[in-house]
Image (cartoon, rainbow, N blue to C red):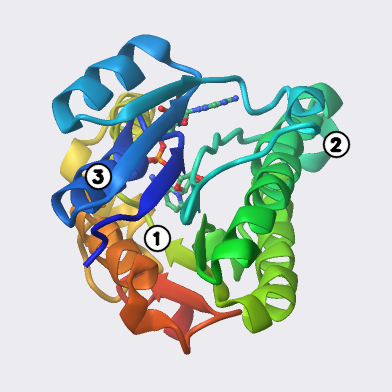
Amino acid sequence: ALSGRRALITGGASGIGAACARTFTAAGAHVTVCDLNGDAAQELAQEIGGDVWVADLADTAALEELSLDADILVNNAGIQHVSPVQEFDPQRWRLMHRLMVESPFLLIRAALPGMYERGFGRVINLSSAHGLRASPYKSAYVSAKHALEGLSKVTALEGAQYGVTSNCINPAYVRTPLVETQIADQARFHGISEDEVVEKIMLTESAVKRLVETEEVASLALWMASDASGMVTGTSFAIDGGWTAA
Ligand code: NAD
């Protein structure tokens, strides 16, 4: 479905990004794994026969002169930090916004001219259920993901006449290293089992009582990246077991 396509996946060395890298490669794309973690990116690129771009995407000044040759751009790199608003470290808040809003803007900006020239492009933004809903203590994350939703919609409107689509994917909790660590920490903190953490803390909002698997997110991303999704743009796809239906 993706033969001849070049895909750039940020945060591609782990979790959802790595699943997308494997799935897109299996579908025939040439994948560039962009990540801060050079070793992990290198290892995955070797496995899939792709390229590596080691970069700190929070260093947004370095991205201003960039030009990208990609048919598919997956804005996936992201981090979480939990703290009440009045205690939230402003430096960390800005870091999260640079990584999760500014850098997607700069990468889209760098990729669009080539996409417009070729008359095809797919921008896939890893938002979150928190791009559509709020939770306490996640002011940086929730506001960054809401901003990404807006950026994605504007990109969709501008790109439409050039065959470029832009959409968001909005998962609930996905089984990734990030979430596995949170589960272990919470289990220790509350003195309950890891299963109980998942059921009683993470899945209170989800009608389907299990975590999302990275391959499930990648399969949605694959369809979004394909020619078949050309009429789908400026929208957001919840993959959240019913969380945002309630
Ligand atoms: P992850 O932690 O498994 O992987 C993120 C990758 O991003 C890592 O390889 C990391 O090295 C890289 N990265 C971090 N900071 C970077 C930087 N400054 N520059 C370049 N790369 C950097 O994460 P994940 O759970 O797969 O999440 C991927 C995306 O999906 C994120 O945007 C996240 O907000 C979103 N998301 C995740 C979940 C979930 O439950 N895991 C749910 C909803 C949305």
Indicate the quadrant containing the N terminus: top left, top right, bottom left or bottom right.
bottom left
> What residue does disc 2 label?
86
Residue position for label 1: 172
- Coordinates of residue 46 in the picture (x, y in percent): 20, 21
Of pointers 1 and 2, the one earlier in the residue sequence:
2
Cβ of mark 3 under 8 Å from ligand 1: the answer is yes
Disc 3 residue type?
A: Ala
Looking at the rendered structure, which numbered label has been put on residue 10?
none
Mark 3 Cα within 10 Å, few/some/many (few <14, many 20+)?
many
Frontmost residue, 209 versus 234? 234
**Residue at horizontal 20 percent and vertical 60 percent from the top:** 210
Q: Secondary structure at mark 2?
A: helix
Per the image, the residue denoted by label 3 is: 19
Distance from Cα at disc 3 to Cα at disc 2: 36 Å
Residue appearing at x 46%, y 29% in the figure: 34
**Closer to the observer: label 1 or label 2?**
1
From the viewer's perspective, tell me whether residue 175 is left or right of residue 61. Answer: left
Task: Specify the farthest residue to the bottom.
Answer: 231
Q: Secondary structure at mark 1?
A: loop
Q: Quadrant of residue 41?
A: top left
Q: Is the residue marked 1 within 8 Å of ligand 1, measured from its CB?
A: yes
In the figure, is residue 98 to the left or right of 177? right
Real-space CA distance between mark 1 and mark 3, rounded to the nearest whole angstrom = 16 Å
Q: Position of residue 23 (x, y in %)?
A: 20, 51
Sequence order check, earlier mark of 1 and 3? 3
